[in-house]
Amino acid sequence: MITIVTLDGPAGVGKTTIARQLADRLGIAYLDTGAMFRSVALYFGEGSWEKPVDQLVPELNRLDFDLEGEGRHSELLLNGYPLSPDIRSEEVGLWASHLGRIPVVRDFLRRNQQAIGRIISLVAEGRDMGSVVFPTARHKFFMDASIDVRAKRRHAQLKAMGMEEGLERIHAQIRIRDDQDRNRVVAPLKPAQDAVIIDTSALDADRVLEKIVEHIRQKGLLDD
Ligand code: DC
């Protein structure tokens, strides 16, 4: 039996941290779909979002994502190779957001994400997991927090990865991404109608995880 838990929310809200820990608790894999958009952005390079669509399609068709392992050891592979740590910069996050507005890019990644979710149980993390990619998922969550809290979280996260960037700059980039991710025509960032919304502004990661686990426990992990 395959179970899909979706975890959506805006940039910097802490989805990856929670998705990894939740997948560990549940003993299933986690799928970081932001990392897929970021890898495509890094692979295609700056300005690729301005290319004509008929040039992007053959380039997309050369890409194939796989997911190996489970819990915190889940690892995405692009054409058989681990993803580059360089995908984590805010700049590449912004490129990913630009590419995420293009329907053929979204379609291509959605098919890849759904193919993975047909084979294994997942905590699937992104912007449109509950609304578009896995609309029939049993458990859907939407994490939110104020932009100030998210910019500070992202700042601390990047610092911990040795990729320090100024708080003001991160704040500005998150604002652009928020606006772009929420207002794009295809699959905009918004909670699925049946998602549980969790405002994490005043909660640490442990509390957020406990809240999510409690909801899942109440409903039961698997279909009856
Ligand atoms: O979650 P993240 O910050 O790693 O995502 C980077 C960008 O990728 C995000 O600003 C928009 C895009 N994205 C998307 O459009 N849909 C997803 N499911 C995941 C990410």
Image: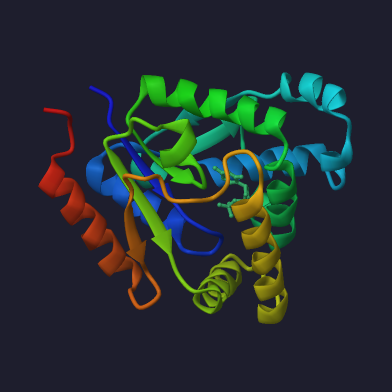
Q: Position of residue 116 (x, y in %)?
A: 45, 25
Q: Residue at x 73, y 25 (%)?
A: 60
Q: Does residue 178 appear to the left or right of 47 in the view shown?
A: left
Question: In which quadrant will I find the C terminus?
Answer: top left
Q: Does residue 209 appear to the left or right of 84 in the view shown?
A: left
Q: Position of residue 210 (x, y in %)?
A: 22, 61
Q: Nearer the viewer, residue 146 or 81?
A: 146
Q: Which of the 4 image quadrants contains residue 40? A: top right
Q: Which of the 4 image quadrants contains residue 28? A: top left
Q: Does residue 82 appear to the left or right of 71 in the view shown?
A: right
Q: Residue at x 53, y 36 (%)?
A: 76
Q: Position of residue 199 (x, y in %)?
A: 36, 68
Vertical comparison of 100 with 19: above or below: above
**Residue 83 in sight from this viewpoint:** no
**Residue 168 in sight from this viewpoint:** yes
Q: Nearer the viewer, residue 191 or 20?
A: 191
What's the image's color scheme?
A: rainbow
Vertical comparison of 166 with 154: above or below: below
Q: Position of residue 38 (x, y in %)?
A: 66, 45
Q: Which of the 4 image quadrants contains residue 180? A: bottom right
Q: Residue at x 64, y 41 (%)?
A: 37
Q: Nearer the viewer, residue 6 or 191?
A: 191
Question: In which quadrant will I find the N terminus?
Answer: top left
**How many callouts does the rendering have?**
0
Q: Nearer the viewer, residue 69 or 61?
A: 61
Vertical comparison of 160 with 187: above or below: below
Q: Residue at x 87, y 46 (%)?
A: 47
